[in-house]
Amino acid sequence: MKTLLIQSSILGDHSHSKELADHFVARLRQADPEGAIVVRDLGRQPVPYFDGNTVGALFTPAEARTPEQRDVVALSDALVAELMDADRIVFAVPVYNFNLPAQLKSYLDYVARAGVTFRYSAEGVPEGLVKGKQVYVLIARGGKAEGTPDDNVAPYLRQMLGFLGMSATFVAAEGMAMGEQLAAQGVALAKQRIDALDLAGEAIEA
């Protein structure tokens, strides 16, 4: 199976979400030693901000696009192709100011393409087209908000990924900014939850 790991921390090796991702990858190599792993680090190489020029490029007919617009669409196409090609997708997500990083939001905007990764039926019902994937979301948070109204990240990602056709398993490390002891406990608990995952399973039926 091919795994796509999407990291979004700006803290590099000091990131708790990266620490969870590294642990996940180590477990994955044990469970699926022959599997390929592709890493997209949005912290080190963020996609451009999703702005009016981006929208204009995506909605301009191919034959009428400027060279700059073609570059924008080519990037979006490449991100979508990478997503579609993966059997397993892992999002490593730090929480910044109660929400997901801006670079991850831009990434999701680039891959949310009408008629490509989702579509609407004649009745206006949305259907996600990114199907048949194992999806995991690894969250690192400074405080403790899992399962409370203060958790803005998991509900948004559950809705957004579901809109694109993906159902995810969530693992959170909490208390990262609440002192060394609580941070260590939060990371240890999250790693235990990762260890309990069945990572050797086959791809999901589309």
Image (cartoon, grey):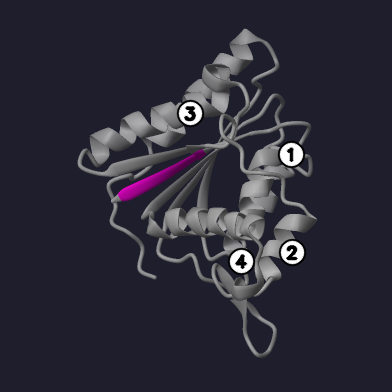
Q: Is residue 4 magenta?
A: yes
Name the residue type under label 3: Leu
The answer to which of 69 and 6 lies nearer the viewer is 69
Q: Which residue is labeled 4 in the image?
A: 113
Q: Secondary structure at mark 2?
A: helix
Q: Secondary structure at mark 3?
A: helix
Q: Residue at x 73, y 31 (%)?
A: 96
Q: Which residue is labeled 1 in the image?
A: 99
Of marks 1 and 4, the one in the foreground: 4
Q: Position of residue 122 (x, y in %)?
A: 65, 90
Q: Which label sits on residue 20?
A: 3
Q: Position of residue 24 (x, y in %)?
A: 40, 33
**Badge 4 density bin: few <14, some 14–19, many ≥20, Cα 10 Å:** some
**Which corner quadrant of the image does residue 34 belong to?**
top left
Q: CA distance from mark 4 to mark 2?
A: 13 Å
Name the residue type under label 2: Gly
Q: In the figure, 75 relative to 18: above or below?
A: below
Of marks 4 and 2, the one in the foreground: 2
Main secondary structure found in the magenta portion: strand
Q: CA distance from mark 1 to mark 3?
A: 18 Å
Name the residue type under label 4: Arg
Q: CA distance from mark 3 to mark 4?
A: 29 Å
Of the residues under marks 1 and 3, which one precedes in the sequence?
Answer: 3
Q: Secondary structure at mark 4?
A: loop
The answer to which of 65 and 72 lies nearer the viewer is 65
Q: Residue at x 21, y 38 (%)?
A: 33
Q: Residue at x 32, y 32 (%)?
A: 27
Name the residue type under label 1: Asn
Asked if labels 2 and 4 touch by Cβ distance under 8 angstroms, the answer is no
Return the residue found at the far bottom.
Answer: 122
